[in-house]
Image: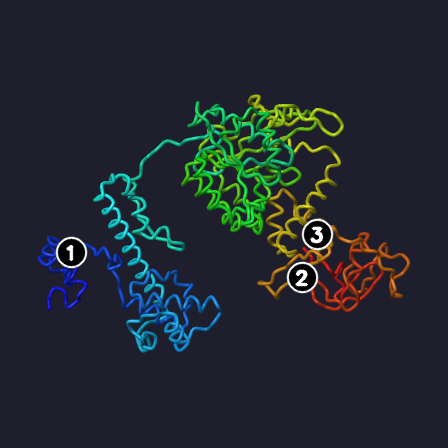
Amino acid sequence: MNPQTNGDPEREQLGVSHNNTDNHSVRQASTNPRPWPRDRLRDAPHHPDDERAVLAVVVFQHVPPSSLDLEPADFYNPDHEALWRVLEAMEAEGLAVDAITASDRLTATTERLSDPNLVTGLAGGDALAVNAQTYAATIRTDSHARAALTFLERALQRVAGGEDPADVLDLDELDGLRTGARRTGSRLGKLVDPAQVKAVRREWVKRDWYPCDVVTILAGHGGEGKSTFSLADVAAGSRGELHGRRWGRPVRSLIVATEDTASDQKLRLKAAGANLEHVRFFTVTDPRGEELHFNLELDLAELRTAAQHFGADLLVIDPLSSVTAGLDLNKAADMRQALDPLTMLARQLHVAVLVIHHFNKGGGNASRKMTGSEAIRDIARSVIHFAHDKESDERVLTFDKGNYSTYEGRSFNFELDSAPAIDDAGNQMIDEEGNLETVPVARLIGETDNSVERIINSLPQGQEEGDAQDCASWLREWAESVGGVLEAAEVRKASESAGFSWSAAKRAKNKLRMTSDRDGFGKGSKVYWRIPEAATDHHRAHIEPIEPSSPDVGPMGPMAVPMVSPTSEPEPPASPVDPVRTLDLVPGDPCGICGKSLTLTPGQRLCAARHRRAQEVAS
């Protein structure tokens, strides 16, 4: 037995010293190494004890196989690989793993087992469930090393066969195999020396407008020209006319538009003079070819592949609210979950990303007018606002945020012209009544002293009623998108970000007949607003008022003033109460404030503690 290899036949074959501190032995081994066996390339680094430990914690300590991010091929020992397949299958079938069943299945599904007592032999070891991830990490590392060695072996064989080494040695692919970076769920920390980072200047698809590697947001009320303006720049880019890194050469654009049809987009692009060879629409389909609604979370990988294949320079996503289904626009965590990966995609592909987004209704601080969480503005490196002064017909865009731009704070006029809608045969389209059809085309005019904030705050008298309706619509849409229940504290913060006062939000709650209830008691309790079940249906049935049946309800109905105790503080006169809003409460229901039973009084529903409008929580 070779003392340097400690009796390990594999180490003797490979000429590797067991004692890595023996420099002489290492040098001696390296001068006459045995090449990696070509008939069994998996003869490479492995730790059989760690493989057995992983199997033991799954079989005897019931650690789920799926939690360890291992594949059968990661195991070096063929018996271990076969057992792992059995354990994965049992988990997939919802079966509890036990040693007897696992052993029987292993014997039934495997023709040759070098160790028939493999499963029972795992018992009695010192493997701990708490160390399962450590064992698994060692197995993954070994697997990645073997994959890299396999890659090198095959590359060397191809070079020996006469192929050019530059064609077969992809060092990036080799590094990916070595580190396991391509494995789902593998995340590896890495120290980066600033001296190794190449300093480069900032690049733009459109200078001072659309920086590469980050997200730019075009925001404004509906119908203000955001989408049309973005298509005008797509068209200019396709002709090589955007002043940026592609000046004089075509900018290739990929468009994700969920609210406008591809036909509408095409007509506007043609009217703007686009070279359609450099433009593509991106859609998602199921296996049968049926078009699906694009979802930023679910379909980002497909979008990445398409952008790489097309060689895109510019991505346009229109609008944000439509591609984030299942996420809450008002929650910072949800928005970062959607937009941070999009920003990473922009950086990795070195593209500019335009996202079309909407304003909340009404006036206020323009920087806080975008629908949803302020995290949306924080994530974007460039934000451009759009507005239309309907009194003067002036259209203005303002650079609200420009981390790299010299245009921040400046405003420009633009206009929307009408251009003929031309069909594929080159003829102008005509509608059913014989009128010539047109499409809008955006054109930048020049700088202005006006601003988006000035326009959206120049509201005509009497607009307050419309703003109240806008607040109610905003509150309803948010509530319906999250199942009908909102935490009051979140509503308060979100309403301020949306440009509505807290009082307006409470009035909107009353308008929507939302109820309030408190969860818990004392300092840690929370108040929730709930939209009635009928209100979550866009086609709500009309609710007929119920005729009062109690003798306590007089003919004055909701105009009456509630009675008060002589010893209580006088309450202010009650506002007229909508009978439809209050008749959903009956005697005996709990008060939404204190939980005491309700009683009937003329026009109001009071609890024993005499809270007015007992279905609401006091602010």
Q: In the displayed image of the protein, which residue is found farthest to the top?
A: 445
Mark-to-mark CA distance, 3 and 1: 78 Å
Residue marked by disc 3:
509
In primary-sequence order, the first of circles 3 and 1 is 1
> What secondary structure is found at the residue carrying circle 3?
helix
- With 48 as the anchor, is 572 left or right in this view? right
Eyeballing the image, is 284 above or below 536? above
- With 486 as the anchor, is 198 left or right in this view? left
Give the percent coordinates (x, y) of residue 120: 33, 77
Eyeballing the image, is 434 above or below 78? above
Give the percent coordinates (x, y) of residue 285: 55, 46
Eyeballing the image, is 230 above or below 320? above
Q: Residues within 10 Å of mark 3 (few under 14, many from 20)?
A: many
Mark-to-mark CA distance, 2 and 3: 13 Å
Residue marked by disc 2:
517
Q: In the displayed image of the protein, which residue is found farthest to the right?
A: 555
- With 322 as the anchor, is 545 left or right in this view? right
Give the percent coordinates (x, y) of residue 87: 40, 68
Closest to the camera, between mark 3 and mark 1, is 1
In primary-sequence order, the first of circles 2 and 1 is 1
> What secondary structure is found at the residue carrying circle 1?
loop
Amino acid residing under circle 1: Arg
Residue drawn at x 36%, y 62% is 72
User: In the rendered view of the protein, which quadrant contains the N terminus?
Assistant: bottom left
Give residue 34's mark. Answer: 1
